[in-house]
Amino acid sequence: MATWRPPERIKYAPICEPWPDAAVAQRSRLFSPVDVGPVRLTSRTWVPAMVPWRASEEGEVTPAVLQWYERFARGRPGVLVVEATGVRDVPSGPLLRIGHDRFVPGLASLVETVRRASGGQTRLFIQIIDFLGIRRRPSREKFLGQHLRIEASHRDHLRLPADAPEALVRERLAALTDDELRQALSPRDWESLQHGFRERVTDLHVPAIRDLPQTLPGIFAAAAQRAAQAGFDGVELHYAHAYTMASFLSARNTRDDGYGGEREARVRLPLEVLAAVRAAVGSRIAVGCRMLAEECIEDGNTVEDAEYFAARLAGAGMDFISLSRGGKFEDAAQPKVGEAAYPYTGRSGYECMPSYYSDARGPFGRNREPATRIRHAIRAAGLVTPTVLAGGVHHFSQAEASLERGEADIIALARAALADPDWFSKVRDGQGGTVRVCKYTNYCEALDQRHREVTCELWDRDALDEPGLMLTKDGKRRLVPP
């Protein structure tokens, strides 16, 4: 499917500046310790959650998952966050899950692998997530012949009698042009035809969705308890992007049951989930969240909303707040028939993962200004909750400047760490000049969009004959960075 690109199309290149020597790096704020709740980090470096599509179809840890995280741990970042891990015990393809006790042994082996590979230097957190249902875009024939629920409104539009057979209604609808059909269908049904059906937190007519405020706190709490049992140092509650908890926070959440509408109501469930998680794990492990500095969609949350939410969440006991932006379904590109919508294909998706072709703002540091405002809002509330800044950081100078200016307390590197998991150890040891620098082509994002094993164009075809190396099924790409 087509991905949104800024109209200016200005080509950018990664920063090319001298790297610090070992003495300068080791005296820097970036490589200084910081406390995140009960956990002390050896540095202010952070690898945020990235889904590599290496779990089993049953959501279990596999040897490929262990090798993936072992490789990042060898670079010794301050924190390594395990990919978005489902809190429900429901099929979700090759994504890690934590919705049942049977997943704990595999996750415990992951913890042990990271501790061993990092020499105990890297703290391992796990991001836990809930998501609602989404279906692939159907063909016109299949949607009208099977999926569409025939209502009285369809018969009225077609001027058919109230007792007209359903088969006749479907036949008449199928004979309409697209313009005519759009008039005959509700906006929601038209969207389901064009993009695939997607559940929303506002679907209060669906019992399971109406009851989310009653069910989710316990589900998240049980998942966090399993994370603590497996030995993780912290959990990151996924309150960002296109998923359930972010949808409750969104300005588009119009629920009328006390969990939507005004900001106070929209933050209610995230606060209740936090309270349940904290009650389950106490202060044994760090509990924080990933949230959006801005939704970057029409009628979505602005930085003012995020300032309010961050202060409320920090005041309720979050140990850290990690800030991202965009990545929503509402402006996602239309998928092909047979494919599902992908929430990083619209403008909001670009804001989350900009490429080297960008506008005048450029692809690096688009989240800095809103993140600064959010951190200041937390401090203005009398709180010292550390914030994590992400977004195109790939050079020491960027990271150090953001820390010195008070834009954040911790710096996250996603694509930069994917390109070179040794970024942290190389820079700390004065070997920054040997870092394999991300090109920001979003090669990795294109693989994620197709639910293929995520790799990097800078290394996935390098030394494919390395002994013991895991390869993709076609044997053309390596699964672990060199």
Image (cartoon, rainbow, N blue to C red):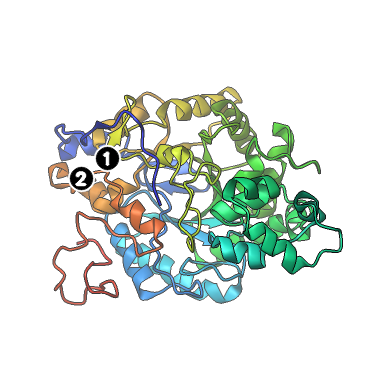
The picture places residue 104, in percent across and down from the top left corner, at: 53, 72
* Residue at the spot 47% in from the left edge and 38% down from the top edge: 348
Residue 398 or 246: which is nearer the viewer?
246
Which disc, if any, is residue 394? 1
Q: Are marks 2 and 1 in contact (CB under 8 Å)?
A: yes
Q: Name the image quarter holding residue 252.
A: top right
Question: Is residue 352 at least partly visible in the picture?
Answer: yes
The picture places residue 303, in percent across and down from the top left corner, at: 54, 28
Horizontally, residue 264 falls left or right of residue 412, namely: right
- Dot 1 surroundings within 10 Å: few (below 14), some, or many (20 or more)? many
In the image, is residue 117 above or below residue 410?
A: below
Give the Cα distance between marks 2 and 1. Answer: 7 Å
* Residue at the spot 41% in from the left edge and 49% down from the top edge: 48
Q: Which residue is mark 2?
A: 437
Which disc, if any, is residue 159? none
Residue 99 or 92: which is nearer the viewer?
92
Question: Is residue 324 at least partly visible in the picture?
Answer: no
Horizontally, residue 306 falls left or right of residue 324, namely: right
**Number of residue marks:** 2
The picture places residue 101, in percent across and down from the top left corner, at: 60, 73
Horizontally, residue 169 falls left or right of residue 290, namely: right
The picture places residue 399, in percent across and down from the top left corner, at: 31, 34
Three-letter code, disc 1: His
* Residue at the spot 29% in from the left edge and 62% down from the top edge: 71
Three-letter code, disc 2: Val
In the image, is residue 371 above or below residue 127?
A: above
- Dot 2 surroundings within 10 Å: few (below 14), some, or many (20 or more)? many
Precedes in sequence: disc 2 or disc 1: 1
In the image, is residue 337 above or below residue 312?
A: below
Helix, strand or loop at mark 1: loop
Q: Name the image quarter holding residue 405.
A: top left
* Residue at the spot 62% in from the left edge and 29% down from the top edge: 308
